[in-house]
Image: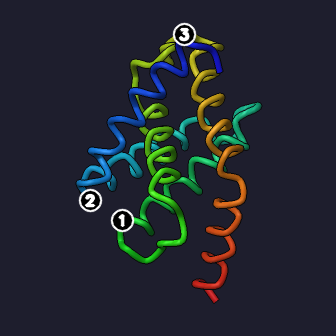
Amino acid sequence: MNRMVKSVFKRMTKKAVSVMKNKDQMQEVSIESLKKGALYKGRKGMDDMWVDVKTFSRLVQEVKKGRYRDISKKSVVMIVGALLYFVSPIDAVPDLLAGIGLLDDVAVIGFVAGQLKSELEKFREWETGVRI
């Protein structure tokens, strides 16, 4: 990630701390990220991001409900920060810029997914067990 993207992401993670204190705001971030992500579903190069956004959203919902606790607060802050970055119309590269506007969103979502790979895998395993 470049410096500008890192700077905006850092601001979003700070905002995530306050969002996490309000279950309604957590719900809103989760829903808005799914709505925005659905707009790009099936587009070339967006499949991995869409899978990660859906996973982030489900994880946030389960943490919000108190059903999933096997994740650090720092990791949840990163996830909520990434979702805030994703849904924000004003980020390092505005989404309105055709062709390049989502590159920073993809980078942030991918960065967080990469950093939290093992925790996300544990969450998916937990989900599978809950559904059975």
State the image coordinates of residue 119 (x, y, percent, origin top left).
65, 61
Query: Which amino acid lies under the numbered mark 2 shown in the image of this protein?
Result: Lys
Q: Is residue 113 left or right of residue 79?
A: right
In which quadrant of the rendered view does residue 6 lie? top right
Q: Residue at x 54, y 71 (%)?
A: 70
Q: Please tell me which of labels 3 and 2 falls first in the chain.
A: 2
Residue 52 at what x, y percent from top left? 63, 49
**Residue marked by disc 2:** 23
Please tell me how many numbered marks the rendered image carries: 3
Q: CA distance from mark 2 to mark 1?
A: 6 Å
Which residue carries the number 1 mark? Answer: 64
Residue visible at 58% across and 84% down? 130
Distance from disc 3 to disc 1, alpha carbons, whole Å, reads 34 Å
Element on which disc 1 rests:
helix
Q: Are marks 2 and 1 in contact (CB under 8 Å)?
A: yes
Q: Nearer the viewer, residue 79 or 46?
A: 79
Identify the residue position indicated by label 3 in the image. Answer: 97
